[in-house]
Each structure stands twice: as structure tokens, then as C-alpha cells.
Image (spheres, helix red, strand yellow):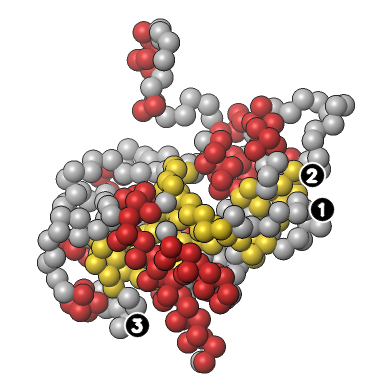
Amino acid sequence: MAYDASDHEAAANSLTAVKILVAGGFGAGKTTLVGSVSEIRPLRTEETLSERSELVDSLYGVEQKSTTTVAMDFGRITIRRDLVVYLFGTPGQQRFWFMWDDLAHGALGAVVMADERRLADCFPSIDYFEAKGIPFVVAVNCFDGVRRHSVESITQALNLATSVPVLVCDARRRESSRDVLVALAQHAITRHHGRRVA
Amino acid sequence: MTAVQPFDSEWLDQDAGPVVRPYALTGGMTRPRAGQHFDLLDLVGVIRRAPQDMPQLPPEQAEVLQRCQIPAPIVDLAADLDLPVGVIRILVSDLRERGLVSIHRAQPAGIGDLKILQEVLDGLRRI
């Protein structure tokens, strides 16, 4: 996003801020990715979890994680003094969708984190970004080092267009998380060229 | 930490959630003033300090004012001051009404601006 001076008394400093969303199912590694690649801070929203949520969130395959996060994960990568990338780890559950439009407005793109054991959890995120025309990549978080499926079979299972990059990553590793963001920026540029040709 | 009364530690730990309702920090307002909606990345900058004759600002507003001496996006204010985004939006709309801050509107540049995309790509490769 660039800033204009619609309030003409506005301050002189300019800042270009770019938004990247990190979405995906419960426990797929959103917090880990944002934390490994940026200076992470919690960002509170007004919403509070109801007691009911513990029943709604399926815990199958994520037994380690017993609570869900209401605060968004918010990370900042300063590229230059006047160019900053903001990362938003968005709550994956559908009841938080009312927040997504706010977050998605003007976003460069999105990373959809996938857990191979629970691939179907990314469907809502993928549907959302496809419908909004927001470029996205799918990052399969292989934190235990075990790969169960090939990239091709994941692309198929998620019914993705072949142009959507699917990467395997270890979200705990900074370089690995960085590569995911680089792939997203490249994909956004490719999409940009595609639009101009079309 | 200094010594805490036993009943404090029993009732007022973090798990108890916020002890102060958000509207208590906003002078009772539950939404920004009419017609004002701020994007998360809208930039808030101070125009002038609160004049001497103005009634003293509530501490949260004073903090926001202090923090945006260097213009800062709404999200940074929320994270830095550890206040919910909705509360910051209301405080900022009030400060703007008083003529103390101005807002740079964020323009969606995202996938539309190739130059920015290329700079982001090059920058991310270096981190």
C-alpha cells in the first residue's frame, strides 16, 4: 500500500506498508512461520472466545495444542526505512471470517499453511483467496521432517490450479519461511504480468 | 514483581481476561465517530500537541498521541500500546476530531504496483 496525503495537513514522513496474510487450519504453523521470519507481536482484537469453541475446534492430529489463539499474530519485516512488510496470522476458523475482509483489503497476497495430516483444513482459506482474487501460495509445514505426499498429489488433493505454487517448508526455520514469502512475492509478480497480458 | 495480595493473584491473573472493558478506555464510545473507518495500515501522525487550555486527555489518548510523533500505522499503535485494534480506531477518531492527528489513507497498492512488488521481492531475498 502507498499513502497519499488526502489529509493535506498530513505528516511529511512517508511509509509504504505491504500486507501479507498467513492463513490456514488450526495448529498448521501460522504462528511459527510469522515468528521465525519477523519480529512478532500479538495483536488483540475485540473478540473473545466463547466456551463453545473448544467443542467446535477439532483437535484431531493436533493433540499438542489445547488452546486456540484469539489474538492475531502480527509480524513486521522492515525492508527499508520507508518500506515495511506486515504479516498477519489470521485465525483459520470460519467464525473469524468477518475479520478477513479487513485484513485482505489491499493485501499483496497470502500464505496458506497446510498440515499434511489435515489437508482439508485449508479449503476455507483457499476458497476465500480464490474468490477474492488474492494471489496465494500453499506452504506444507513438514515440521516433523516426514513427508507423506508429493507436491503433485497435494496440488491435486486441494484441487488447485497448477499455477498456484505449493512448497514444502519447515516453518521453524527462518530461511525456509523466508523462501515461502519469496515464492509468494514472485507469484504475485507473475500474476501481475498475467493480468497485463490478459 | 512485588508482593501481591493473595486474593489478587487468585482472581486477577492473565487467564481472567481483560479486567477493564474496552469501552472504559474510549470514554464510552463503542465505535469510531460517524463516517470514520480506518484501515489497519492507515498512518496516524501528530499535527500538533494538545494545547494548554484543552482539558487533559485521558491517558490512553495521550499515549497514542505520544506514540505517533513519528507517523505510525493503526496496527503498530495497537501492538505497541497493547490495546485492541477497535479501541485504537476509536481513540484515533476522537483525536482527529480534536484536530490533534491526521490520517494518511492507505491506498491498495498490493498486486497493482509492480515496482513495489519487485522491491518487496528483492528485500525478502535479503532477509
Residue type pointed to by label 1: Glu
**Residue drawn at (71%, 47%) of the image:** B45
Name the spot of residue A28 as percent of width and height, x first: 27, 55
Provide the residue designation for mark 2: B47
- Quadrant of the image for the N terminus of chain B? top left
- The answer to whether mark 1 and mark 2 are in CB contact below 8 A is yes
Find the residue positioned furthest to the front: B126
Find the residue positioned furthest to the bottom: A197
Q: Which mark is residue A9?
A: 1
**Residue drawn at (64%, 64%) of the image:** A2
- Quadrant of the image for the C terminus of chain B? bottom left
Looking at the image, can residue A10 be seen? yes
Element under label 2? loop
**Residue drawn at (35%, 44%) of the image:** A69
A10 vs B7, nearest the viewer: A10
Q: Which mark is residue A163?
A: 3
Residue type pointed to by label 2: Ile
Name the spot of residue B77 as percent of width and height, x first: 59, 42
Callout 3: chain: A
Q: CA distance from mark 3 to mark 2?
A: 47 Å
